[in-house]
Image (cartoon, helix red, strand yellow):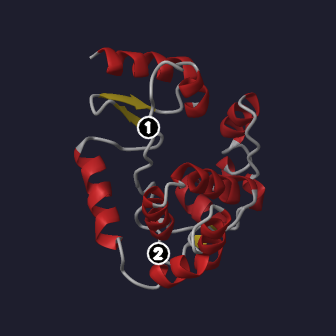
Amino acid sequence: RLEKAISLVPDIAVEVTYRPFFRDPTIPPEGKDRRTYLVNKFGEGRLKTLHDPLIAAGKADGVHYHFERITRSPNTLNAHRLLRWSLLAGVQAAVKEALMLAYFSEGKDVGATPVLAAIAAAAGMDGEQVAKDLATVREVDAVFAEVQTAQSMGITGVPTFILGQRYGVIGAQSAETLAKTMRKAVAG
């Protein structure tokens, strides 16, 4: 929807930066078994229909979710570190898209170094260097600082869009709503 919204405002130069936010900061570094995680969080009874609204919304937007392929609920710290590095490399949009596809459509563990290194390499980054950097603490503090900033702003979920450093749009809003807010942010 964000990409569609941008296409609705061709007269506005839109710069997108993806920032970190942990949907569940309690997930350990190795992740958790997905089914166990969901049962503990939502209960056995909700599992059959838990993702139905997202699947329906995705189909309407041409996005194909395959939640049945997801076996791990990953800790996303390293994915967020990769997103920071990809911004500096000028390929953040491609990396973000690849992360979403890998997780929601292919069921890959986007907390795993081999998956992240492959995504980086496919986007034109040095995958081997990314793997080496993920073995260090490079950018860990910066990611946590950004998450803290988001929390101090009152952000409690994703997606949240901050437009023009002044307007916030929370939730999976329509492209038209996002475009309208972009125009409002530019108008001042």
Q: What residue is rendered at 68% in x and 65% in y?
A: 122
Report the front residue among 80 and 42: 80
The amino acid marked with disc number 2 is Pro
Mark drawn on residue 15: 1
Q: What residue is rendered at 56% in x and 71% in y?
A: 111
The amino acid marked with disc number 1 is Glu
Of labels 1 and 2, earlier in sequence is 1
Cα distance, mark 1 to mark 2? 33 Å
Is residue 30 visible from the viewing direction of this image? no
Report x, y in % for residue 66: 76, 51
Report the front residue among 145 and 97: 97
Q: How many labels does the image show?
A: 2
Identify whether 156 is placed above or below 82: above
Is residue 61 visible from the viewing direction of this image? yes
Label 2: which residue?
Answer: 28
Q: What is the quadrant of residue 40 in the picture?
A: bottom right
- The crowding category of the residue bearing disc 1, from other C-alpha atoms within 10 Å (few below 14, some 14 to 19, many at least 20), is few
Quadrant of the snapshot with the C terminus: top left
Q: What residue is rendered at 66% in x and 38% in y?
A: 54
Q: What element carries label 2?
A: loop
Single out the mark in the foreground, 1 or 2: 1
